[in-house]
Amino acid sequence: MIIVDSLVKSQRIISKVILVMVCNIVLSDLYYSGGVGTRTITDNFQTTYGNTLNITHGGETEFDTRFAIGYMPFRSIASLPTYDYFVECGLSAFPHDVTYNGEGSGASSSYYVMTSDSYIFGRLGAMLRLSPSTFTYLQGTMEHTFDEQYEFTTPLAMVDVPSTSFGGGIGMRIISKNKFFLDSSFTFVKGSSVDAFIDGLEVVNRPRRATFIGSIGRLF
């Protein structure tokens, strides 16, 4: 009985040690980052109210902010590989409204405002080391807007138009010895048409967004 109890205790200790080791390995490759930048909206935005069709296009460049958590294999600066990768997901938001201006017939009345916009994103990057601590990378990106709201005066209404977009871009990442890193990237995404209806108003939007972000992050 004593031998069995000792074996059980030994197994529990070994299991805890293995769990701690696995957690340390996984956490050492996780990172968090925060960044700011600019986002340019060039959506194809159409509204139909009654028999009137208005076509507008986003064209403003606005301030963008984001926070992300990611995974990037890392041991030390001395052992960085020639090729590496990262996986990242996060939340981004506009602190300001975005204006959509009309084009063509009815342009004077085609004036809409995106009053709020938040989106979640995911990035997968393939990295190439240029120097002992500097990588350039290509990335694939997915973005989903869940808090995209537009304000109209005719009719007086607020319309939610969530959308999902896919795209890619390029970037550069510089890693320091103390696990901090600087990251800059350019991304372009494009989505399929999404519809919304309210009080006789039909809204059709095809998102096109370009984003430049500079971030600072740290591995755990």
Image (cartoon, grey):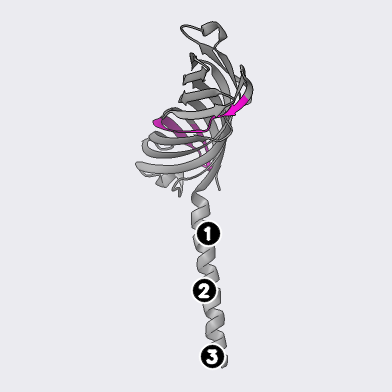
Q: Amino acid at mark 3?
A: Ile
Q: Are marks 1 and 3 in contact (CB under 8 Å)?
A: no
Q: Is residue 84 above or below residue 149?
A: below
Task: Give the image location of residue 200, x and y in percent.
Answer: 56, 23
Q: Main secondary structure of the magenta part?
A: strand
The residue nearer to you, when weighing 198 against 45, is 198
Residue span colored magenta: 158-183
Task: Give the image location of residue 1, x and y in percent.
Answer: 56, 93
Q: Earlier in the sequence, mark 1 or mark 2?
A: 2
Q: Amino acid at mark 1?
A: Cys
The residue nearer to you, when weighing 153 against 52, is 52
The residue nearer to you, when weighing 83 against 204, is 204
User: CA gap, disc 1 to disc 3?
Assistant: 30 Å
The residue nearer to you, when weighing 191 against 76, is 191
Task: Give the image location of residue 146, x and y in percent.
Answer: 56, 35
Q: Which mark is residue 14?
A: 2
User: CA gap, disc 1 to disc 2?
Assistant: 14 Å
Q: Earlier in the sequence, mark 1 or mark 3?
A: 3
* Mark 3 Cα-neighbour bin, 10 Å: few <14, some 14–19, many ≥20: few
Residue 94, can we see it?
no
Residue at 50% across / 41% down in the picture?
A: 89
Q: Are marks 3 and 2 in contact (CB under 8 Å)?
A: no
Residue, disc 1: 23
Q: Earlier in the sequence, mark 3 or mark 2?
A: 3
Position of residue 88 in the picture relative to residue 136 (left or right): right
Inspect the magenta stretch and tell me whether residue 173 lies in it. yes
Position of residue 8 in the picture relative to residue 187 (left or right): right
Residue 205, can we see it?
yes
Residue, disc 3: 3
